[in-house]
Amino acid sequence: MARARVYVTLKEGILDPQGKTVLRALKSLGYDEVENLRIGKYMELALDGEDGEKLEARLLEMCEKLLANPIIENYRVEVET
Amino acid sequence: MKFGVVVFPGSNCDHDCYYVIDKLLGQPVDYVWHGSTDVAGYDCLVLPGGFAYGDYLRTGAVARFSPVMKAVEKFAAAGGFVIGICNGFQILLEAGLLPGAMMRNTGLKFICRFVNVRVETASTPWTSGAKVGQVLKIPIAHNEGNYQVPHRVLVEAKGQGQVVLRYCSPEGSVLPEFNPNGATENIAGVCNPEGNVLGLMPHPERASEAELGSTDGLVIWRSLLDRCGVEVAS
């Protein structure tokens, strides 16, 4: 059994209205040091298999097909066997 | 002209589309369940609005893998007419049948109200009965209508006349203040290079009877019928 984490983030240049709102909220609470904030997605997966490289290749395929939209999002995966 | 209204789990404008096609346009129409893999015999497929698969992950992201979508892709590639309205537009984007992607509205609010959209091209089957610059008053109802498209793709799409509708003032001025959701260049509707696939955020089926406040949606339905040589009593 392997575990995997998938991080999906918005591409640079894509406006993140949600992130902007949260950034403004933090500033209104006095956290002036916050300069930028982007909201993304985090997913945890349980995978059947031992071969980390193979699992990672499959995961990247899942990201490309479904978990992320490559037009607006970047993704990164971590596999733990 | 035979229509098929595709029903995904979570579609909620399917009945409205069916009603308009059946009662107002007088055309034969069926519901097509998303599990179907056969769309033979139809001339136009409608992907209606709603929240297919609860909009989980991203709007349209799961629906685009519904069994029916392979058939829709083949149908579109063979020149069949496909119109995606609101959630249907989002599904067409995720499926790659139209360029771009949908993001959450910049105001973070679900917007449900009439907007004005300007017809940018009359060369598509969907707008052949309109004049370029004509303003249509049609309602929107969405949380994710913030249309994003890579610059290079947008330049290409514009060059091929794929931008069909833009949010505008009642007089037809395309200005940022009339952009309800942050969509790139006020884009409200796009088609594929061939013109047979249209995606739009406004709901023409909700603006097809005077009782509902506007009949401008009929311009889109009637253009298509006219292009296909079908006569409709007015």
Image (tube, coloured by chain):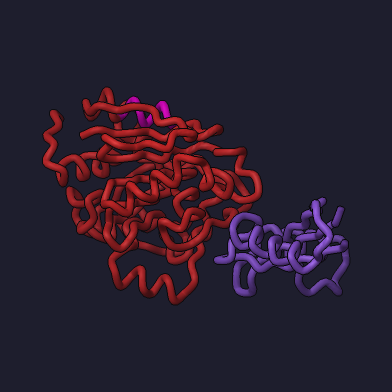
Chain colours: A purple, B red
Q: Position of residue B36 (x, y in %)?
A: 44, 34
Residue B88 position (above or below residue A22): above
User: Can residue B104 be seen at all in this image of the molecule?
Assistant: yes
Residue A47's x, y, as percent?
Answer: 80, 53
Question: Residue drawn at (39%, 44%), measured in percent from left and top?
Answer: B71
Q: Main secondary structure of the magenta part?
A: helix
Return the x and y of residue B42 as percentages of the image width and height. Answer: 28, 36
Q: Is residue A1 left or right of residue A40?
A: right
Image quadrant occupied by the N terminus of chain B:
top left
A30 above or below B124?
A: below
The residue at the point 58 percent across, 65 percent down is A70
Q: Is residue A54 above or below residue B9?
A: below
Q: Quadrant of residue B106?
A: bottom right
Name the residue at 61% across, 55% down: A66
Residue A61 falls inside the magenta stretch: no
Q: Residue B16 colored magenta? A: yes
Q: Quadrant of residue A5?
A: bottom right
Q: Tag count in the figure?
A: 0
Using the image as rendered, state which of residue B132 and residue B74 is in the foreground: B74
Q: Is residue B160 left or right of residue A21?
A: left
Front-most of B38 and B79? Answer: B38
Q: Which residues are magenta?
A: B13-20
Q: Pick out the residue farthest to the top.
A: B23
